[in-house]
Image: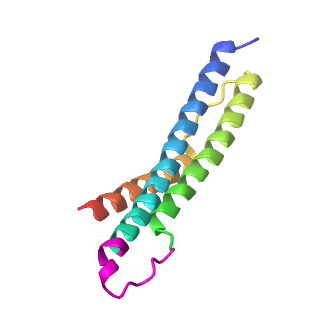
């Protein structure tokens, strides 16, 4: 295979992006499940009182994390195929980070700040 090391590096980078996206999605699920657990815990503690039913609502932060994880998967796949075409083209094109990477990085920073605000 021609340019095997370049293709292997591209695939390893893609897999790292996918692994990061799965971690982001899993963190969203963890937040949602913990909120559900705490709602049931509150309902069981207040069992002697007039109990209000446990509301089934989705935590906006958990939903945002799942959507960000899906966006990372889509972006990583697009980036993987774009770099695969660049490797096969064998021309000396300059690499540009571009707006998708900057936007994704800004979105991840905003999510991190949102999590820090909720914790503190």
Residue 103 percent across, percent down from the top left: 51, 54
**Residue reaching furthest bottom?**
50
**In the visual, does 34 lie left or right of 19?**
left
The answer to whether 42 appears left or right of 60 in the picture is left
Q: Is residue 51 above or below residue 90?
A: below
Q: Is 91 situated above or below 74?
A: above
The structure residue drawn at horizontal position 51% and vertical position 70%, both measured from the top left corner, is 58
Q: Quick check: 73 above or below 14?
A: below
Q: Is residue 110 magenta?
A: no
Residue at the image point whose x is 60% and y is 33% from the top:
14
| Picture coordinates of residue 112, whole percent (x, y) | 37, 54
* Snapshot quadrant of residue 106: bottom left
Image: magenta residue range: 43-56
Q: What colouring does the structure picture have?
A: rainbow
Q: How many marks?
A: 0
Q: Quadrant of residue 86?
A: top right
Let me know if residue 45 is in the magenta part: yes
- Seen as rendered, the residue at the extreme top is 1
Q: x and y percent of residue 50 in the render?
A: 35, 88
């Amino acid at each position: 295979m021609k340019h095997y090391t370049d293709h292997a590096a591209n695939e390893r980078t893609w897999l790292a992006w996918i692994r990061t996206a799965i971690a982001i999605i899993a963190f969203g699920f963890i937040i949602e499940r913990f909120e559900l657990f705490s709602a049931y815990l509150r309902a069981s503690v207040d069992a002697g009182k007039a109990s209000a039913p446990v509301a089934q609502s989705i935590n906006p932060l958990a939903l945002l994390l799942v959507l960000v994880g899906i966006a990372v998967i889509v972006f990583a796949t697009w980036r993987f195929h774009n770099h695969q075409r660049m490797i096969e083209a064998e021309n000396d094109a300059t690499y540009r980070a571009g707006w998708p990477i900057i936007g994704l990085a800004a979105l991840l920073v905003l999510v991190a700040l949102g999590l820090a605000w909720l914790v503190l």
